[in-house]
Image (spheres, rainbow, N blue to C red):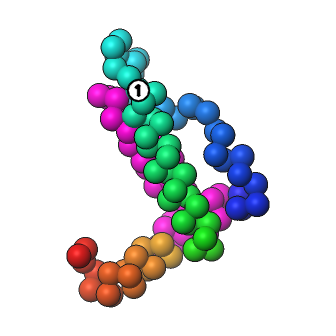
Amino acid sequence: MTGSDESWLNDGLDDVMGGDHGLWVPGIDYVAGWREAREVADRLNRALLNAGFELSAVRAVASTCEDGRGLVRLTGWPDAVERLAGLLEVLAGNNGGVR
């Protein structure tokens, strides 16, 4: 998927809990956590598009933890993630560490 089609912004809640979780716990607001994660994932996806990545190769996906907190997962093909890691290393001054 490329930046010309923004249907990825309207995906729905298909990965709210992820595949490794059980049933939702009553009283926990998973949707609020997912919405917060979705906003941040959308921002990261736009940044990836602006950096020349295709969202079919690497993208941020909104989800939630068991306790309802938002969670953003980065998913992608190894070569695209390797390229992203290289760009981040350059931004960090090639020292391989975080400032």
Identify residue type, mark 1. Tyr
Instruction: Please indicate whether residue 82 sits to the left or right of residue 91 in the image.
Output: right
Quadrant of residue 68 in the image? top left
Task: State yes or no: residue 67 in magenta.
Answer: yes
The residue positioned 40% from the left and 76% from the top of the image is: 88
Which image quadrant: the C terminus?
Answer: bottom left
In the rendered picture of this protein, how many numbered marks are placed on residues? Answer: 1
Q: 30 and 74: which one is in front?
A: 30
Percent x, y of residue 24:
39, 18
Looking at the rendering, the stretch of residues picked out in magenta corresponds to 53-82
Percent x, y of residue 26:
35, 12
Instruction: Please indicate whether residue 98 sits to the left or right of residue 3 in the image.
Output: left
Percent x, y of residue 7:
72, 46
Task: State yes or no: residue 52 in magenta.
Answer: no
Q: Secondary structure at mark 1?
A: helix
Taking 1 as reference, is 79 above or below it?
Answer: below
Percent x, y of residue 34:
45, 35
Taking 86 as reference, is 24 above or below it?
Answer: above
The residue positioned 39% from the left and 85% from the top of the image is: 90
Residue identifier under label 1: 30
Q: Is residue 85 visible?
A: yes
Which image quadrant: the N terminus?
Answer: bottom right
